[in-house]
Amino acid sequence: MAREISELPMWRDSASLIICVKTTDEVHVFNYKLLMLKRSDRTAFIEDQTVFPGGLYDESDEVIEWLKYFESFGVTEQMFEKLLGGRCYDQLFNSTNAMPREISLRINALRETFEEVGVFICRNREQLLTIQQWSFCKPACDYQQSYWQEIVHNDPRQFLRMCRELKVVPDLWSLHKWSCWATPAAQETPMLLPEKTEVKECLWLSPMQYLQMHRDKKIHLSSPQFYEITRFTCSGSFDKLQKFAQERDKCGVAFYLPILYLCDDGIVSVLPGDDFYIGDARTSLELRQTNCTIEQFRLKSKRMHRIETIGSPVAVCLNFKPFKPLDNHLLSICEGEVDNKAKL
């Protein structure tokens, strides 16, 4: 019998938001840019750590008052059903209230994004009547961006109060499920207001530019960010990426919890589908010894789905041998292939 989630080692829940913006000029083969943030020295665990906006889940993200407010605003049960899909997140996270995680994680991502860079993705009553996917909505009236950003940063519960006072709701319907990791897009570029204690710099770049900066050691992408950025290299077209995200939203989300193997010259993060993804990853949080090099470890596998972290300074690369993406998702491109033209 499978162990209950509550019996397994726990991690801190969080949510991130990948904001994709269409551009008029093509950068290499991409006509869109992604928003990423350089963490401040106070919050980064490694110099120039670069991440998607987001942060820790807060109890206020799932209080029943949110559902009451949505209902009073005119959000119907059918509108919520558009968000639920296969209810995949409820199977991966504990939830203490009746609110599905497909809703509360969206609130989490939108709140944290507003805290970090001042991007407030929301809908007023008029915009709520004509829900269109991948729209970027602003409050119907001007608001004190920096004032509310500080208020919400100091107390996440104030995010609901802000929505009430501005007469808007968080735009849950412009967000699409993308991925789910555990570790030991807007139509126009919004004005950013970085939160000084958490964010050093905001970047709007193409996937290829991020990978090049990572190779040049100008930024540091941890394994999940590196993996997701290489996934975007499959698609150079904003419109095709938009259509893909909308169609795939009905699918589930695979749970990526790496199993770590220590090699003589680095660490290998093995992912689902790999021959060495053995046992329950949620109970395998310690490094497994290989007593061989990363290259020798590769030779022991017929199927590979892994991230290899080599040397100091750290170099990260992906390795696949043959592997079909989980849950009808885009296949991340191996490090040696990312210069090829995007295929989607």
Image: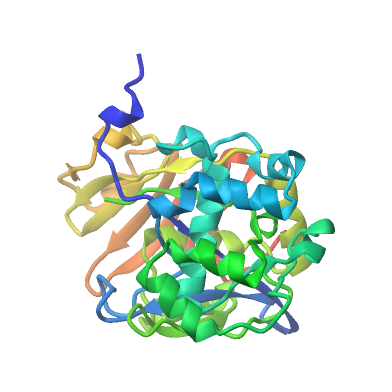
Q: Residue at x 51, y 51 (%)?
A: 105
The one nearer the camera, 133 or 227, is: 133
Q: In which quarter of the image is residue 333?
A: bottom right
Q: Which residue is drawn at 28% across and 73% down?
A: 44
> Residue 167: percent from the left, percent from the top?
67, 67
Q: Give the answer, above or below, for where 52 lies relative to 246.
A: below
Q: Which residue is drawn at 55% across and 42% down?
A: 253
Q: In which quarter of the image is residue 119?
A: bottom right
Q: Is residue 123 visible?
A: yes
Q: In this view, does 199 lie to the left or right of 209?
A: left
What is the number of callouts on the image? 0
Q: In which quarter of the image is the N terminus?
A: top left
> Residue 67: percent from the left, percent from the top?
59, 46
Q: Quadrant of the C terminus?
A: bottom right
Q: Which residue is drawn at 30% across and 61% down?
A: 309
> Residue 263: percent from the left, percent from the top?
20, 51
Q: How is the image coloured?
A: rainbow
In this view, the residue farthest toward the right is: 130
Q: Can residue 193 be seen in this view?
A: no
The one nearer the camera, 221 or 127, is: 127
> Residue 277: percent from the left, percent from the top?
35, 36
In this view, the residue farthest toward the top is: 1
Q: Give the answer, above or below, for where 178 lies relative to 89.
A: below
Q: In this view, does 285 lie to the left or right of 235?
A: left
